[in-house]
Amino acid sequence: MKPRFPLYVKITAASFFVVLVVLAFVSVILYRQERQALEDKFGLTLQHVAQTTGLFVDGAAHSRVHTNADAANDDFKKVREVLERVRRENALKEDAIYTLRPSQNGKLEFVVMLQEKTFVGDTFTPAPEAAQVSAWVLADGQARYTHIYTDQYGSYVSAFAPVRDGGKIVGLLEVDYGVDRFLAELNAQRQKRVWIWPASLLLALALSLGVAFSITGAVKRLVDGTAAVQSGHYDRPVEVATRDELHTLAESFNAMLGGLRERFAMLKFVPRHTRAVIADSIKGSLTGSGALGAVAQTRDVAILFSDIRGFTAISDKLGPARVIEMLNIYLRAEAEIIERNAGSIDKFIGDAVMAVFEGPERFVNAARAAIEIQEAMHRLNVSRAFEQPVEVGVGIAGGEVVMGSVGYEDRLEFAVIGRLVNLASRLTAVAGRGEIVVSEIAREALGETYNVERLDGLKLKGFADAITCYKIRPVVAKAS
């Protein structure tokens, strides 16, 4: 049987380990940031020097220098004068600026240098970091600088720029800067920080022990209470006997449980798109508008309305209890279809349903849901699920709407507002029994998936201009 350690021991050990990891992590991050800052500081400066100097190097003259014998020619001297002027202006060492050209097998060949004893034509294999950057510059003509790299002579940052003869790259200009002294300073600073570790760890150990003993029992009960909430149990209050901040925390936790019970029970009444907008507002992605606590957002959606044709006549024939039973069957069927097709019920309005569809396939999903609703009503009627046949009309419109809360700070209600909501409702009134009517924008989004019947010149309540809409039904493949 494995030994069981008291919780305070685990808390102390965990705290000690966390402090150790944090100290190590911070040390590594600081060193990398300082090293990166060092690279950028020298690299960007060298890149600017190389890029500017490369513009003044005569590429044609550079191309005519091949051996040490050419070092006495005007072409060599012309390029060398440019390098010397740049060296003086930037306080560079004599061996820190020179020109190169690519040689065979990934090597580079010296062309022009500032040393008294020249070595034109000598080849060398650059360090991997320098080789990679120089290859990129030769390939695309963009000046670049290296990370800090080390070779047999020390640690450097180098920058490369193209030497051009007209539009052709005929060589490279390299500028180097030794950073050994700066790296030594970075390492010394890192070593100093390491000495802080023992004191920090001892202090963390002492504090962890003291805190762990005082909070172990209360924390365990709070953790158990949190686990219960995560499991969906909101009826398990936490009891803490101490009279301190932990007791206050336990009381707040218990008060939170009561609020969670209420909110969890209310979630079924909140549409999915409403929860999404509220979640966005909590993240700070929305701006407040209207009353205190209100949120608003414009979104491109598809709106689906459906209602029962002749509902008044049906309800007159049935008693209230049977009307409610019929509506529950009807609304449950529609809600399941809408949810299955990525829609969200916005509200039930008596026998009518309003749903919202979002995303790039919003019109396709809305139309598919409408078709499935009509098919479901047909099946329910055939199976005599209702005492009276139920037939519905469906309207679909879409575009930009405003989703937001309306009311005042003590009573807010979420609403989807816009001309297109009214249009979807009016199209539902146009739709006959078992029919689906969609707006012109919805028709365009659906493509050739459905057979359509154009309805021109409709005068709809609340719309000054005549409206064009379409009845849709699925395309049925013909038997071959």
Image (cartoon, rainbow, N blue to C red):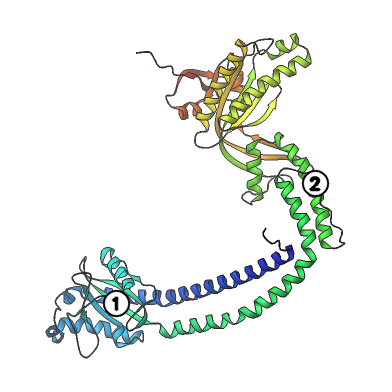
In the displayed structure image, the side of residue 62 where residue 296 appears, left or right: right
Label 1 sits on a secondary structure element that is strand
Image quadrant assignment for residue 111: bottom left
Q: CA distance from mark 1 to mark 2?
A: 72 Å
Say the numbered circle drawn on residue 174: 1
- Residue 120, image x and y in percent? 18, 82
Image mark for residue 326: none
Camera-side residue: 131 or 164?
A: 131
Residue at 71% over, 11% down = 314
Extreme residue in the left direction: 69
- Answer with mark 1 or mark 2, whichever residue precedes in sequence: 1
- To which quarter of the image does residue 112 belong? bottom left
Residue 274 visible in the displayed image: yes
**Number of marks drawn:** 2
> Would residue 386 be found to the left or right of residue 466 on screen?
right
Q: What is the three-letter code of the residue carrying label 1?
A: Glu
Q: Is residue 81 left or right of residue 453?
A: left
Q: Is residue 473 above or below residue 32?
A: above
Question: What residue does disc 2 label?
Answer: 236
Where in the figure is residue 256, as x and y percent of width and height? Answer: 78, 49
Residue 419 image position (x, y, % from top left):
60, 31
Q: For the point 19% across and 84% down, which residue is it?
A: 119
> Residue at 75% of width from left, 11% of height from top?
318
In this view, the residue farthest toward the front is 1
Viewer-side residue, 208 vs 95: 208
